Image (cartoon, rainbow, N blue to C red):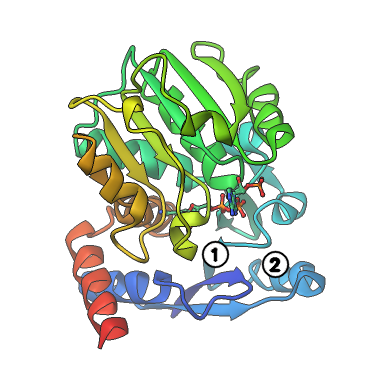
Amino acid sequence: MTHRWACLLGQPVAHSLSPALHNAAFCSLGIDAHYEAWEVAPGALGEAILRLRAAECMGANVTAPHKRAAVGYMDEVSAEVLALGVLNTIVNQGGRLIGDNTDARGLSRWMREVEIETAGRSALVLGAGGAARAAVWALADLQAASVRVLNRTVQRAQAVVTSLQPSLKAVELSWGPLDEAARPASAVWNVVVNATSLGHHGGALDLHPSCYSRDSVAIELAYNPPETGFMVAARQAGARAENGLGMLLHQAGLAFERWTGEAAPMDVYEQAALLAAQRSAA
Ligand code: NAP
């Protein structure tokens, strides 16, 4: 049988956990394949995507800054990509490239697994980039009653809501400026998702503790560092706090399933992520 491969397209990619996760998964299931990270400048994206049509290529992951631009090179896209406007996974089906977004479904699958109650509840999403869009989609998928999107650049929060509301009809979406979160809350939020890049960059987020109750869950989408100021403040206010590692592992697992047709070994991903974290701390 032919040796197969998959890869990550992005810039930068050196920090990515994806090669460690997928190579460990191929190895544990005895799949003759490898995964590598490709540093791809914006001007070279088309050429890189062309290489994915090769018979031995299973597909790719796509990260910043190419998640939106890559959509234009696909032969077909999933309903999530149509709604979100961005992809993170490409599947090569006999030379045809299918674009998918496993960030959104990865987040909702992980939230279900760790029993974050969302149905009929209210949620707050901080940020308006690709991760925030995925979070809004996931919360709607979990049947949240309402989602409010707050962002520093308020027009981007408005754009998230106006572009997603037509495909997410059952959830009430609203938007506002990020500094609204610093003021005493008029009602508590059941789920608060930090989808700004402040967690990843170690910046502080000004969030009033009255937005939480003891039933609330705060989700930091960044996973490096594993504990952020947003998570510490949420715990101090009595809420449960989680980081974005679960979302990362599940988006990887869904991509793996699409490429190989086999269930992803989630325990192998967890071990590989742990090992990579220990290596980077050493
Ligand atoms: P992005 O598209 O660059 O969006 C960044 C967001 O952060 C924007 O809303 C931006 O606001 C806001 N922001 C940046 N600096 C800020 C500041 N100083 N003050 C207030 N807001 C600020 O990034 P993304 O791809 O959505 O990623 C966002 C986060 O999610 C990152 O931490 C990333 O690591 C994480 N993530 C995790 C996963 C996972 O699998 N766990 C997957 C994807 C992303 P403006 O619009 O005003 O600039």
Q: Amino acid at mark 1?
A: Ala
Q: Amino acid at mark 2?
A: Ile
Q: Is mark 2 within 8 Å of ligand 1?
A: no
Chain-order first, disc 1 or disc 2: 2
Badges 1 and 2: C-beta atoms under 8 Å apart?
A: yes
Q: Is mark 1 within 8 Å of ligand 1?
A: no
Residue under pointer 1? 60
The image shows residue 172 at horizontal and vertical percentages of 52, 12
Helix, strand or loop at label 1? It is strand
Q: Vertically, is 157 above or below 89? A: above
* Quadrant that contains the N terminus: bottom left
* Quadrant that contains the C terminus: bottom left
Q: Is residue 42 shown to the viewer in this render?
A: yes
Residue 49 has which mark? 2
Q: Is residue 98 or residue 129 the one in the foreground?
A: 129
**Disc 1 to disc 2, how far (Cα)?**
9 Å
Q: Vertically, is 25 above or below 107? A: below
Q: Is residue 182 or residue 65 the one in the foreground?
A: 182
Residue 222 has which mark? none
Q: In the image, 279: left or right of 196?
A: left
Q: In the image, 148: left or right of 75?
A: left
Q: Is residue 78 shown to the viewer in this render?
A: no
The image shows residue 216 at horizontal and vertical percentages of 25, 28
Q: Where is residue 228, by image quadrant?
A: bottom left
Q: Where is residue 273, by image quadrant?
A: bottom left
Q: In the image, 279: left or right of 13?
A: left
Q: Vertically, is 43 above or below 14? A: above
What residue do we see at 68% from left, 73% from top? 51
Q: In the image, 238: left or right of 138?
A: left
Q: Residue furthest front?
A: 184
